[in-house]
Image (tube, coloured by chain):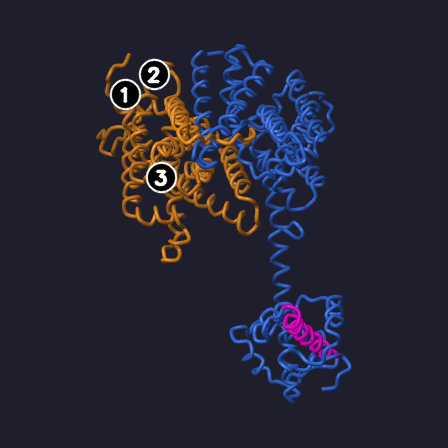
Chain colours: A orange, B blue
Amino acid sequence: MMSFDPNAFLIISTASLIAISCGLLGVFMMLRKMSMTGDAISHAVLPGIVIGFFISGSQRGLEVIIGAGILGILATLMIDWFRKKAKVQLDASIGITFTLLFAIGIILINVLAYKVDLDQECVLYGEIAYLPIDLWITGSGMNLGPRITWLAVLNLILVLGFIVSLFKELSLTSFDEGFSLVIGLPAGAINLALMSMVSYTTVSSFEAVGAILVVALLVVPPATAFLWTKKLIPLIKITAGLGVIISIIGYYFAYWLDSSIAGMMVSVSGVIFLASAILKSKKPNFKFGTKIADKPFSI
Amino acid sequence: MNDFVYFFTFQDPSIAFVVLGITLLGIGAAYVGTFSFLDKKALIGDAISHAVLPGICLGFILAGQKDPAYIVTGAFVSGALATFLTSWLRTNTKLSEDTIIAAMLSVFFGFGIVLLTVIQKTGNPEMAGLNQFIFGNAIAILEEDLLIYGGLAVLIIICLSLFQKEFSLLVFNPDYGKAIGYPMGTIRLVFNVLMILSVVIGIQAIGVVLMAALLITPGAAARFWTDKLGPLLILAALFAVISGIIGTYISFVFPQMPTGPWVVVCLSTVALISFLFAPKKGVVFKMVARNRYLRKSHREHILKTLYKALEEGKESLTIEEIYEAFPYQTQESINSIKSLYEDQLIIKNQNVISLSIKGKSAAKRVVRLHRLWELYLNEYMNIAPDHVHDSAEKLEHILTPELEDLLENRLNFPKLDPHQETIPRDHDEL
């Protein structure tokens, strides 16, 4: 069963590429306490995907990526507008924005159901298992291999390029936005750029892992890594490593249970996350006779 | 149109049942959601609503069919587990709350998807019904489902109404509640249970992904219309019920449309209208009020300029002199002069402007308020005379006649301000 066939290798490596791209962006989202904004963006790009799909007539169109990018930025701006202009508290702004945009996306899918070949389950859960048969064939008929793998490679290159070139700015604005503004960094623009990268990554991965499960890859590996280290560089390395590990374990578990690969990857990452949380939870320090104060059951 | 009449006259008892169900659900969810919104924990509702998916699937696997009792129990258990884990992680790890919520939400949802695909592979014919839980289908609610969902909704509504005092204590000031001897831990626990229950009963009609909207949006929208808890709850419930019924109607007319998204779109429209047009807090209202204030203060500044010229012995000023007094505000000055002229506060003679009798008394009032406030700051607040001008420049537009009387009495009708300038009274000659 644990056979090493080329399809398994392809699926695992594509999943790892996607998980690494998401994890790298997720580290900065987490440090900015914007994990829920990431969640909101990944829901909110849905109408953009549907409209782009409708205009271009295929999932491969550039229109899809542009549509999703626009919606992702729109979601960020909407949250900001609700919070600053209408003075709605942040959690409610996020909740209202993403539910509205997601609802519009679902309605569009249903309205255009007979015109576009896009079913809501594919958008939501993705189906990475079909990856080996979805090939990129050029006009001259040359077979270049699976299309989604190429997308994932391109995505990772762009994410890496983005983070490497803006590493100093990203980390400074994440840790001390006030200071970065004082020394003249355009913190708002960097924030928007990060959000655009998140939207682009969401679109580029939605076929494989689904729009909602992108959230898990954005949030869970960085959160797990954060339990193990306090330094930024190790945090990024552990996150990337976790991305690969959950892809491998997730694939074989899904193969064994015959279930959704993306879903299984997320479940595996959840188990690793909870195990790390139990291992690294705050424990009473007997040496100094301290203990954690009893807190009421609260949420 | 026939559809409309057929739907809203409730000839079909099953439609009446569905509308009753969505009404109870809307009220229950809006009540719980408003409390959690006020508690600034609105996103917990989002986490719970995603987290019930594995429970629904497990309930389905155990029952082998779409049995509401199993599904509700399963959903409740997994919602409770997610809530407990969220709270445990918050106290026992260094992760921030939003990361924990996002992680729990996506992990539970991912596990739910795994179970869903496992069920799909078994080829159970009832599987089609399970997909409705993702986006909701209110029309598919059967009478026996309604008994459970409606019953739970009524339970939530009664519980929240009976213990409204305790829950408002929890939301507004839990420390005070603890200090006066309320069992805040237990109240929190009961509240969490009610919150999970309200998500559980909503999943059939609205779906897991969008159930969060029914919890968050009504409260956020209603908050723009009132500052009192009672009306807030009623308004939120009203918004939720209206949107619920509209959503149900749409999915009745177009059977392929899921209910949830339409309910959410209606609710969000209500919320957007509230954000924009609600009196006092709405964006448009605030913008209008701000513009009105800016216009008023600019008018008063022009009156003041004319009055000061009068003090220096100049009966009138040319329009250009006024424009120069307010650099970069020429357009505002043009508008203000126009409106002052219409109100007969100034007299315009070609290019030359002077105060009318009415205008003189209005200008005196502004200058009087300015100087009275300067004197008050100087005498009662011990602020140096050269530091009082800026504050007076703002307060001169705001002070009411009542405050003016108080100031006059307190300062004993002074003649001079801290800069030894006369405080003008209405009967004074110039």
- Queried whether the magenta region covers residue A175, the answer comes back as no
- Kindly identify the amino acid type of the residue bearing the numbered disc 1: Ala
**Residue that mark 3 sits on:** A25
Q: Which residue is drawn at 60% across and 47% down?
A: B275
| Dot 2: chain letter | A
Q: Which of B207 and A70 is in front in this view?
A: B207
Marks 3/1: CA distance?
26 Å
Q: Nearer the viewer, mark 3 or mark 1?
A: 3
- The structure residue drawn at horizontal position 58% and vertical position 18%, both measured from the top left corner, is B72
Residue A52: percent from left, percent from top: 41, 39
Task: Determine if the magenta segment contains residue B376.
Answer: yes
Residue A252, x across and y down, in percent: 32, 18
- Tell me if I can see residue B252 in this picture: no
Q: Which residue is more in the foreground, B36 or B339? A: B36
Numbered badge on residue A255: 2
Magenta stretch? B358-381
Give the labeled residue for mark 1: A8
Picture quarter with the N terminus of chain B: top right
